[in-house]
Image (cartoon, rainbow, N blue to C red):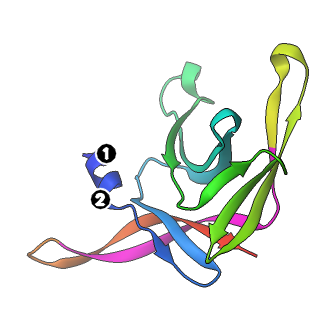
Amino acid sequence: MKTLALSLSLLFVSAANASVILEVPTDFWTDRSEAKFEVNKGQGRAWVTFMQIERMRGGHKSANAETVRETPIKVPGMSYDAASQAIVLEQEGRLIECATVRTRGVSIFKYDKITPTGCKLVVKQAKKPYDDGFRTRYLKVTQVHLITE
């Protein structure tokens, strides 16, 4: 059911400097939500990952444990540029550098450090009207906004 709700609630709405790239119903158990940029350097791809973080409730062993549910979001026009080592977004015929990607560490400890530069990811809570055919009610939703500077 959650997968169906997630797939039905994806929105790609553009505005001048901001756009909603994801909208999902807010889960009662979610403690916090975050978003981050991710890359696949080999294929030149970049995307945004939405994370819903839930604190485990229950016995003494799971008192500090968290569960993270990740949802990758494909953003139209977003890619990885190997020449500049940056995540870029093509919007209205111009390229916007959203983040820089630097490889850190050595040997098996290598990782990509992604630092946002020209784009911001903002996670907001909102209420949207929902009409089920019998009555209209307001549902809490979580939105991920991609804001270009």
Could you tell me residue 67's position as x and y percent? Answer: 53, 33
- Answer above or below: position of 141 versus 65: below
Q: 99 or 26, which lies in front?
A: 99
Q: Which residue is mark 1?
A: 3
Q: Quadrant of residue 17?
A: bottom right
Most distant residue in the left direction: 134
Q: 87 or 81, which lies in front?
A: 81
| Residue at image location 85% in from the left, 51% down from the top | 84
Give yes or no for residue 99 being in the magenta stretch: no
Instruction: Please tell me how crowded label 1 is: few (under 14), some (14-19), or many (20+) other residues with Cα within 10 Å.
Output: few
Secondary structure of the residue carrying tag 1 is helix
Task: Report the predominant secondary structure element of the magenta stretch.
Answer: strand
Question: Disc 2 marks which amino acid?
Answer: Leu
In screen coordinates, is 18 left or right of 87?
Answer: left
- Answer above or below: position of 116 versus 20: above
- Answer above or below: position of 130 versus 21: below
| Residue at image location 51% in from the left, 45% down from the top | 72
| Residue at image location 59% in from the left, 29% down from the top | 65
Could you tell me residue 123's position as x and y percent? Answer: 59, 63
| Residue at image location 8% in from the left, 76% down from the top | 134
Give the mark nearer the N terminus: 1 vs 2.
1
Question: Disc 1 marks which amino acid?
Answer: Thr
**Magenta residues?**
114-131
Could you tell me residue 122's position as x and y percent? Answer: 64, 66
